[in-house]
Amino acid sequence: MIAKCTDRRIKACSTRGLWMKQTEQSISDPLRLDFGELSYSSRRRKMEGKPKEEGEKSGIIDTWLRKHRLVYTGATRHPFVLSIRDGTVDLSAYKRWLGQDYVFVRAFVPFLASVLMKAWKESDDSLDMDIILSGMASLNDEIAWFKSEASKWDVQLSDIVPQKANEDYCRFLESLMSPDTEYTTAITAFWAIEAVYQASFALCLEDGSKTPEELRETCQRWGNDGFHQYCNSLQNIADQRLAKASDDVLTKAEVAVLRVLELEVEFWNMSRGQTL
């Protein structure tokens, strides 16, 4: 749900996907987005003097991804995503996704603000707030992109009524905003939301993909390497928190990740016109 940075350093990162202005300037070379010094692991290694290998070793999230590989694959290689990659996507499904995701992103704004607030209250590392704030800074650009894309496809955003899968996802975000939800659980869920989009749309940019030219910009927003690095930064934050968490918080965070994966599948299903 975010995006990335301009000025070849940091200026703003968009949520769930893009790094809008830099991507727009780099459509001819969409994977050359420089994350500068935003990489959490590289900055932490610099501060702590640790070698690269130690800073990048497997954490709890990687363990969960192996444990729940089938569920994760179902969310990141969904038939809707595969149809984009294979060039067989029904454009009415794409337009349905576009309108519904616009509604979702607007609900995502207060959720991300709540994650930032939790980081301020609970994190003992100032880098957490820097990275989350960079995502907050780009949400306005991301919403502007949705409006522009909707206009191109003649999607009337003012007429969009959120469908059940969207409402369920938004209610889940609201539950994570509760003061009773620990920062560790919230940041882990945030990572999962972003990581699913990055992995899904990166698939559509792989060599041999037949993604329609008119959809490549969309895939570049979330599938670019810079956004992949941002997701890695979020994962590193979550892993740092999870490594110190109680068993109760670990359980809550794992359940939250599984719920995100379930909701993403339901959102893709909705986009294809499949409803419960």
Image (tube, rainbow, N blue to C red):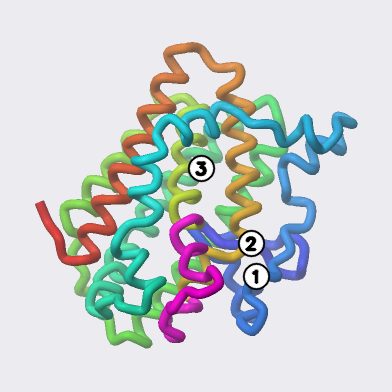
Residue located beneath label 3 in the image: 191
What is the C-alpha distance between the residues marked 3 and 2?
16 Å
Going by the numbered disc 1, the residue's amino acid type is Leu
Q: Residue furthest top?
A: 247
Label whose residue precedes the other's in the sequence (1 or 2): 1
Disc marking residue 131: none
Query: Within 10 angstroms of label 3, few (less than 14), some, or many (20 or more) residues?
Result: many
SS category of the residue bearing label 1 = loop
Looking at the picture, how far across and down is residue 7, in whole percent?
A: 75, 70
CB within 8 Å, label 3 to label 1? no
What is the secondary structure assignment of the residue under circle 2? Answer: helix
Mark identifier at residue 225: 2
Q: Is residue 67 above or below residue 162?
A: above
Residue 150 lies, in percent from the top left, at: 35, 80
Quarter-wise, where is residue 13 in the image? bottom right
- Mark closest to the chain's N terminus, 3 or 1: 1
